[in-house]
Amino acid sequence: MSQEVRLIGTFPDDERCAHGIEKLKGTRAKWHAYYPMPSEEITAAIGRGPSPVRSFALATGIVFAFLALAITIGTSVEWNLIAGGRPIVSLPAFLIVTFELMCLGGSFGGVLGFFLLNGMPAFDLLPGYSPKFSGDRFGLVVQCVETDSGQFESLLRAAGAEEVTREAA
């Protein structure tokens, strides 16, 4: 059985990195992209749609809105105060509390969704990560069998990689 290696291609800009991703899509190798800033080209090349964090924020906002209504209506009904002929359950007054708790819950859900979907906190660095991928360079890490490494190295160089390094997987 052949040994696996990790090829780390460093790209100067996101267009070349996206071009490398497009070339890697048709292969069977496992790969991972690192990029220091949001890039529409790389996101389109990976095929990833909009972030599902907004779904977390919406869901928790709705849950907190119903929770706020339940708390305000429940306490008004449980502790029946004399309201001078006005209704005990007064929705216009309760909507302020509902709106505030909906905003609070939505923000908590957005932060929670961000952390969960990004796998945070990450205590170990992913294999092949380099600090320059957080600065000004883009990276593609390709894990492949050693016999195919020459093909993938030439693929990365043809896509515009300025440097390709090899390490054991």
Image (cartoon, rainbow, N blue to C red):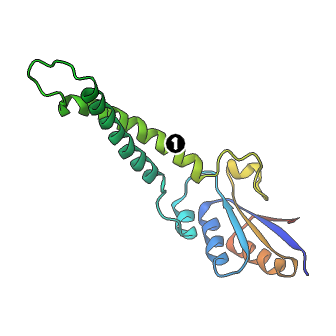
Is 4 drawn above or below residue 81 in the view shown?
A: below
Q: Quadrant of the N terminus?
A: bottom right
Is 164 drawn above or below residue 25 in the view shown?
A: above
Q: Which residue shows up at 36% across the image and 34% down it?
A: 101
Please indicate whether residue 168 sits to the left or right of residue 42 in the image.
right
Please indicate whether residue 115 sits to the left or right of residue 93 in the image.
right
Residue 51: x %, y % from top left: 49, 57
**Disc 1 marks which amino acid?**
Val
Q: Quadrant of the C terminus?
A: bottom right
Q: Which residue shows up at 58% across the image and 46% down it?
A: 115
Q: Which residue shows up at 63% across the image and 77% down it?
A: 25
Q: Quadrant of residue 5?
A: bottom right
Q: Quadrant of residue 167?
A: bottom right
Is 27 drawn above or below residue 53 in the view shown?
A: below
Residue 168: x %, y % from top left: 89, 66
Query: Disc 1 marks which residue?
Result: 111
| Viewer-side residue, 81 vs 106 | 81
Q: Secondary structure at mark 1?
A: helix
Q: Which residue shows up at 33% across the image and 40% down it?
A: 65
